[in-house]
Image (spheres, grey):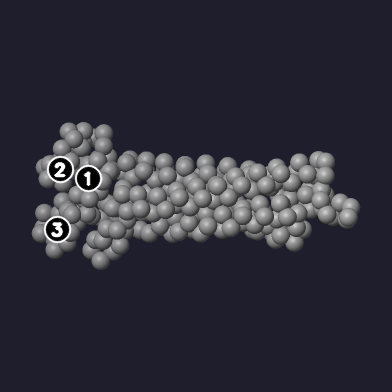
Amino acid sequence: MAVAGCTKCIKYMLFFFNFIFWLAGGVILGVALWLRHDSQTSNLLILQFDGNQAPGTFYISVYILIAVGAVMMFVGFLGCYGAIQESQCLLGTFFFFLVVLFACEVAAGIWGFMNRDTISKELINFYDSAYIKAVDVTGSPSKESATKVLEVFHRTLDCCGKGDDGPLFTQVASSLCPQKAVDLLTSRSCHVKLIELFSEKLYLIGLAALVVAVIMIFEMIFTMVLCCGIRNSPVY
């Protein structure tokens, strides 16, 4: 059994889109691994202070991306093979996985939009708690560990302070911050840098998700057309 005419064209278009989908899965997997091991985020998210670990919401999102990338590569291969073999069974399985992935992507997109500021807010709160202890003049036992946490933030993000720092912090800024950040103390707020850091990464993830969603819609349409074409093709 072999399809012909327009259906044959659909077959090769589906193969092409599945190959792109497979590549997109590889790209998402690669980006997720990069986000997991990026020096800026990893330096900040391994920090511990006063018995508390830096918030891990970002890493949870990254691990989900790693799983999604791996599944996309498997599903893309399944679609390529099903299209070439003209197998209704494989194409039906592929279509099912596509629908599940698309639903998960929509749900993840809604969740991500509703919680888009959560990661930066959690880290800002973590930074502020260390900030308060670091400028404490009462000799708090956690002052030394808080100072080390601030130094990592300042060195990693090339920032200094919260942007509304008082005279007390300004006096100790030279020992806590990179010199160029001290020189521009008012314009290098760590709050702003944290927001920018994760906004850029979330923007990259959102753009990739949008491209993948468009590809998935085309694939679902082509898969249904090809299955109908295979069913109606004459058997020799």
The answer to whether 214 appears left or right of 126 in the picture is right
Which residue corresponds to mark 1?
155
User: Is disc 1 surrounded by few (<14), some (14 to 19) or many (20+) residues within 10 Å?
Assistant: some
* Residue at 18% from the left image edge and 54% from the top image edge: 148
Secondary structure found at label 3: helix
User: Is disc 3 surrounded by few (<14), some (14 to 19) or many (20+) residues within 10 Å?
Assistant: some
* Residue at 26% from the left image edge and 37% from the top image edge: 188
Secondary structure found at label 1: helix
Cα gap from disc 1 to disc 2, whole angstroms: 12 Å
Which residue corresponds to mark 3?
144
* Residue at 26% from the left image edge and 34% from the top image edge: 187
Residue type marked 3? Glu
Q: Nearer the viewer, mark 1 or mark 2?
A: 1
* Quarter residue 73 falls in: bottom right
Q: Is residue 142 visible?
A: yes
* Quarter residue 47 falls in: bottom left
Which residue corresponds to mark 2?
173
Give the vertical position of 192 relative to 42 (above or below): above
Q: How many marks?
A: 3
Check contact, mark 1 vs mark 2: CB within 8 A: no
Q: Earlier in the sequence, mark 2 or mark 3?
A: 3
Task: Please name whichever residue, 79 or 68, is drawn nearer the observer in this view of the structure.
Answer: 79
